[in-house]
Amino acid sequence: MPIKNYGVLKGKAVKTMMGSNNEPHYQVLIKDDAGTQYRIAINIKSQASPSDVLYYVGENFHSEELTTLPDLKFGFTAINPNNPSIGLDYIRGHLFNPSQMIPLPPEASGPDNDLNDKLQDYFKQAIEHGAIIYAFGQRWGPETNQPDQYFKFSPGNGIHDIHMNQGNTGGWTKDNGTWQDGGILIQFEQDKRWVAIFLAFQSQSWCTDENGNAIKPVDECDYKTVNVPK
Protein backbone atom coordinates (compact mmCIF):
# COMPACT_ATOMS: atom_id res chain seq x y z
CA MET A 1 0.00 0.00 0.00
CA PRO A 2 1.46 3.40 -0.92
CA ILE A 3 2.14 5.98 1.76
CA LYS A 4 -0.76 8.30 2.57
CA ASN A 5 -0.88 12.02 1.81
CA TYR A 6 2.11 12.03 -0.56
CA GLY A 7 2.96 15.39 -2.03
CA VAL A 8 5.40 18.28 -2.20
CA LEU A 9 5.80 21.22 0.15
CA LYS A 10 6.98 24.51 -1.36
CA GLY A 11 8.35 27.16 0.96
CA LYS A 12 11.44 28.82 2.39
CA ALA A 13 13.68 27.53 5.16
CA VAL A 14 13.74 29.64 8.30
CA LYS A 15 15.54 27.59 10.94
CA THR A 16 17.23 24.21 11.33
CA MET A 17 17.89 21.75 14.13
CA MET A 18 20.55 19.09 13.73
CA GLY A 19 19.79 15.50 14.63
CA SER A 20 21.84 12.91 16.48
CA ASN A 21 22.09 9.16 16.99
CA ASN A 22 19.37 9.49 19.62
CA GLU A 23 17.28 12.01 17.63
CA PRO A 24 17.76 10.57 14.12
CA HIS A 25 16.10 13.33 12.11
CA TYR A 26 17.41 16.64 10.83
CA GLN A 27 14.62 19.20 11.33
CA VAL A 28 13.86 22.27 9.19
CA LEU A 29 11.28 24.97 9.85
CA ILE A 30 9.62 26.02 6.59
CA LYS A 31 7.26 28.93 5.87
CA ASP A 32 5.08 29.43 2.82
CA ASP A 33 4.15 32.80 1.34
CA ALA A 34 1.08 33.07 3.58
CA GLY A 35 3.16 32.60 6.73
CA THR A 36 1.96 29.05 7.41
CA GLN A 37 4.68 27.08 9.18
CA TYR A 38 5.70 23.49 8.58
CA ARG A 39 8.43 21.20 9.84
CA ILE A 40 10.23 18.80 7.55
CA ALA A 41 11.88 15.82 9.26
CA ILE A 42 14.75 14.27 7.31
CA ASN A 43 16.07 10.83 8.32
CA ILE A 44 19.77 10.78 9.12
CA LYS A 45 19.83 7.22 10.50
CA SER A 46 18.07 4.01 9.47
CA GLN A 47 16.21 1.85 11.97
CA ALA A 48 17.24 -1.18 9.92
CA SER A 49 20.82 -2.36 9.52
CA PRO A 50 23.07 -0.97 8.11
CA SER A 51 22.11 2.24 9.89
CA ASP A 52 24.06 4.71 7.68
CA VAL A 53 21.74 6.45 5.21
CA LEU A 54 22.56 6.58 1.49
CA TYR A 55 23.04 10.14 0.25
CA TYR A 56 23.23 11.75 -3.18
CA VAL A 57 23.50 15.44 -4.00
CA GLY A 58 23.25 17.00 -7.44
CA GLU A 59 24.92 20.41 -7.32
CA ASN A 60 23.56 21.57 -10.68
CA PHE A 61 20.52 19.38 -11.04
CA HIS A 62 18.51 19.15 -14.26
CA SER A 63 15.29 17.20 -14.65
CA GLU A 64 11.97 17.44 -16.43
CA GLU A 65 10.33 18.04 -13.05
CA LEU A 66 12.02 21.43 -12.83
CA THR A 67 9.95 22.81 -15.69
CA THR A 68 6.73 22.49 -13.67
CA LEU A 69 7.78 22.95 -10.04
CA PRO A 70 8.16 26.76 -10.19
CA ASP A 71 4.52 26.99 -11.26
CA LEU A 72 3.30 25.31 -8.06
CA LYS A 73 1.65 27.43 -5.40
CA PHE A 74 3.48 27.80 -2.10
CA GLY A 75 2.36 25.36 0.56
CA PHE A 76 1.51 21.69 0.17
CA THR A 77 0.44 20.16 -3.15
CA ALA A 78 -0.96 16.63 -3.00
CA ILE A 79 0.36 14.18 -5.57
CA ASN A 80 -2.05 11.34 -6.24
CA PRO A 81 -2.93 8.94 -9.08
CA ASN A 82 -4.83 11.78 -10.77
CA ASN A 83 -1.82 14.11 -10.54
CA PRO A 84 1.32 11.94 -10.89
CA SER A 85 3.41 14.10 -13.18
CA ILE A 86 5.54 15.69 -10.45
CA GLY A 87 5.99 12.59 -8.30
CA LEU A 88 9.52 11.30 -7.74
CA ASP A 89 10.67 7.77 -8.48
CA TYR A 90 14.35 7.00 -7.95
CA ILE A 91 14.20 3.91 -10.14
CA ARG A 92 11.84 4.91 -12.97
CA GLY A 93 12.38 8.66 -13.09
CA HIS A 94 16.04 8.65 -14.23
CA LEU A 95 16.79 11.38 -11.73
CA PHE A 96 20.35 10.30 -10.92
CA ASN A 97 22.73 7.36 -11.00
CA PRO A 98 22.13 5.33 -7.80
CA SER A 99 25.72 4.03 -7.85
CA GLN A 100 26.82 7.57 -6.99
CA MET A 101 25.08 7.42 -3.61
CA ILE A 102 27.31 7.14 -0.57
CA PRO A 103 26.48 5.92 2.95
CA LEU A 104 26.95 8.56 5.61
CA PRO A 105 26.71 8.29 9.40
CA PRO A 106 24.44 10.72 11.25
CA GLU A 107 27.34 12.05 13.31
CA ALA A 108 31.11 11.83 13.00
CA SER A 109 34.01 13.82 14.41
CA GLY A 110 35.43 16.39 12.04
CA PRO A 111 33.84 18.73 9.49
CA ASP A 112 31.69 17.91 6.46
CA ASN A 113 31.82 14.14 6.87
CA ASP A 114 28.37 13.13 8.14
CA LEU A 115 24.78 13.58 7.03
CA ASN A 116 24.08 16.29 9.59
CA ASP A 117 26.98 18.33 8.21
CA LYS A 118 25.91 17.90 4.58
CA LEU A 119 22.30 18.92 5.22
CA GLN A 120 23.32 21.83 7.42
CA ASP A 121 25.57 23.22 4.70
CA TYR A 122 22.86 23.23 2.02
CA PHE A 123 20.09 24.55 4.24
CA LYS A 124 22.38 27.26 5.60
CA GLN A 125 22.95 28.37 2.01
CA ALA A 126 19.21 28.18 1.33
CA ILE A 127 18.41 30.43 4.30
CA GLU A 128 21.12 32.96 3.44
CA HIS A 129 20.00 33.24 -0.20
CA GLY A 130 16.25 32.98 0.33
CA ALA A 131 16.13 29.85 -1.82
CA ILE A 132 12.89 27.97 -2.42
CA ILE A 133 12.60 24.50 -0.89
CA TYR A 134 10.58 21.68 -2.47
CA ALA A 135 10.23 18.82 0.03
CA PHE A 136 8.70 15.59 -1.29
CA GLY A 137 7.26 13.09 1.16
CA GLN A 138 4.28 12.29 3.36
CA ARG A 139 2.35 15.06 5.07
CA TRP A 140 1.20 14.95 8.66
CA GLY A 141 -1.12 17.34 10.48
CA PRO A 142 -2.42 19.88 11.06
CA GLU A 143 -2.24 18.75 14.68
CA THR A 144 -4.77 21.11 16.22
CA ASN A 145 -4.37 19.82 19.79
CA GLN A 146 -0.65 20.41 20.21
CA PRO A 147 2.19 22.65 19.02
CA ASP A 148 5.06 21.34 16.95
CA GLN A 149 7.39 19.14 18.98
CA TYR A 150 10.59 20.93 17.93
CA PHE A 151 9.84 24.48 16.77
CA LYS A 152 6.74 24.99 18.98
CA PHE A 153 4.53 26.61 16.34
CA SER A 154 0.86 25.70 16.31
CA PRO A 155 -0.80 23.76 14.82
CA GLY A 156 1.90 21.14 14.26
CA ASN A 157 2.23 20.41 10.56
CA GLY A 158 4.84 19.03 8.18
CA ILE A 159 6.46 16.47 5.89
CA HIS A 160 8.36 13.25 6.63
CA ASP A 161 9.37 10.10 4.70
CA ILE A 162 11.76 12.30 2.72
CA HIS A 163 13.58 9.30 1.26
CA MET A 164 13.03 6.40 -1.16
CA ASN A 165 9.65 4.81 -0.42
CA GLN A 166 9.86 1.49 -2.25
CA GLY A 167 11.83 -1.75 -2.03
CA ASN A 168 11.10 -2.05 1.69
CA THR A 169 10.73 -5.40 3.41
CA GLY A 170 9.41 -6.50 6.79
CA GLY A 171 7.40 -3.95 8.74
CA TRP A 172 7.97 -1.23 6.17
CA THR A 173 6.52 -3.15 3.21
CA LYS A 174 3.23 -1.34 3.77
CA ASP A 175 4.86 1.94 2.65
CA ASN A 176 5.94 0.63 -0.76
CA GLY A 177 4.73 2.32 -3.93
CA THR A 178 5.99 3.82 -7.18
CA TRP A 179 6.20 7.53 -8.00
CA GLN A 180 6.07 8.42 -4.32
CA ASP A 181 9.72 8.76 -3.33
CA GLY A 182 10.83 11.60 -1.10
CA GLY A 183 13.59 14.12 -1.67
CA ILE A 184 14.62 17.76 -1.44
CA LEU A 185 15.04 20.19 -4.33
CA ILE A 186 16.47 23.65 -3.62
CA GLN A 187 15.93 26.43 -6.14
CA PHE A 188 18.53 29.23 -5.96
CA GLU A 189 16.66 31.71 -8.12
CA GLN A 190 19.39 34.36 -8.36
CA ASP A 191 21.95 31.82 -9.58
CA LYS A 192 19.41 29.96 -11.75
CA ARG A 193 20.64 26.81 -10.05
CA TRP A 194 18.98 23.78 -8.53
CA VAL A 195 20.41 21.43 -5.90
CA ALA A 196 18.87 17.99 -5.41
CA ILE A 197 19.24 15.84 -2.29
CA PHE A 198 18.08 12.22 -2.44
CA LEU A 199 18.21 9.70 0.41
CA ALA A 200 17.64 5.96 0.72
CA PHE A 201 18.20 3.15 3.19
CA GLN A 202 20.75 0.41 2.57
CA SER A 203 18.09 -2.15 3.55
CA GLN A 204 15.92 -1.21 0.53
CA SER A 205 16.04 -3.22 -2.69
CA TRP A 206 16.48 -1.34 -5.97
CA CYS A 207 14.62 -4.00 -7.95
CA THR A 208 10.90 -3.37 -7.50
CA ASP A 209 7.66 -4.27 -9.27
CA GLU A 210 4.82 -2.00 -10.42
CA ASN A 211 3.65 -1.75 -6.79
CA GLY A 212 7.07 -0.79 -5.45
CA ASN A 213 7.62 -4.15 -3.76
CA ALA A 214 11.03 -5.81 -3.84
CA ILE A 215 11.38 -8.52 -6.48
CA LYS A 216 14.97 -9.30 -5.48
CA PRO A 217 16.63 -9.11 -2.06
CA VAL A 218 18.91 -6.17 -1.48
CA ASP A 219 22.05 -8.34 -1.57
CA GLU A 220 21.15 -9.19 -5.18
CA CYS A 221 20.04 -5.70 -6.22
CA ASP A 222 21.53 -2.80 -4.31
CA TYR A 223 22.39 0.78 -5.21
CA LYS A 224 25.88 -0.18 -6.43
CA THR A 225 24.74 -2.65 -9.06
CA VAL A 226 21.19 -1.75 -10.11
CA ASN A 227 20.54 -1.14 -13.80
CA VAL A 228 17.97 1.65 -13.84
CA PRO A 229 15.41 0.86 -16.62
CA LYS A 230 15.13 3.30 -19.52
Image (cartoon, rainbow, N blue to C red):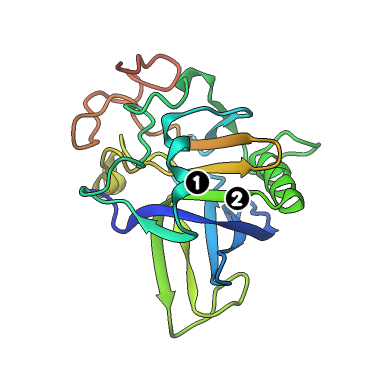
Task: Tell me, yes or no, if residue 162 can be seen here.
Answer: no
User: Would residue 132 be seen by someone viewing this image from the given angle?
Assistant: yes
Circles 1 and 2, Cβ within 8 Å, touching? The answer is: yes
Q: What percent of the width, then of the height, locates residue 42? A: 54, 50
N-term-proximal mark, 1 vs 2:
1
In the rendered image, which quarter is residue 118 located in? top right
Mark 2 secondary-structure assignment: strand
160 is higher (above) or lower (below) than 90: below
In the picture as drawn, the residue positioned furthest to the bottom comes out as 145
Foreground pick, 30 / 104: 30
Amino acid tagged 2: Ile
User: What residue lies at 38% left-to-right and 57% top-to-bottom?
Assistant: 77
Residue farthest along the right direction in this orientation = 110
Q: CA distance from mark 1 to mark 2?
A: 9 Å
| Residue 61, position as x, y percentages in the image | 56, 29
Judging by the rendered image, the residue that carries numbered circle 2 is 132
The residue at 43%/83% (across/down) is 144
Depicted 226 relative to depicted 28: above or below: above
* Res 176 quadrant in image: top left
- At label 2, counting other C-alpha atoms closer than 10 Å, the crowd grade (few under 14, some 14-19, many 20 or more) is many
| Residue bearing mark 1 | 70
Task: Kindly report which numbered mark, 1 or 2, lies closer to the viewer in this rendering.
Answer: 1
Mark 1 burial class by Cα count in 10 Å: few <14, some 14-19, many 20+: few
- Horizontal and vertical percent position of residue 126: 69, 48
Which corner quadrant holds the C terminus?
A: top left
Q: Position of residue 63 (x, y in %)?
A: 46, 29
Comparing 17 with 34, the one in front is: 34
- Residue at 57% over, 50% down: 133
| Mark 1 residue type | Pro
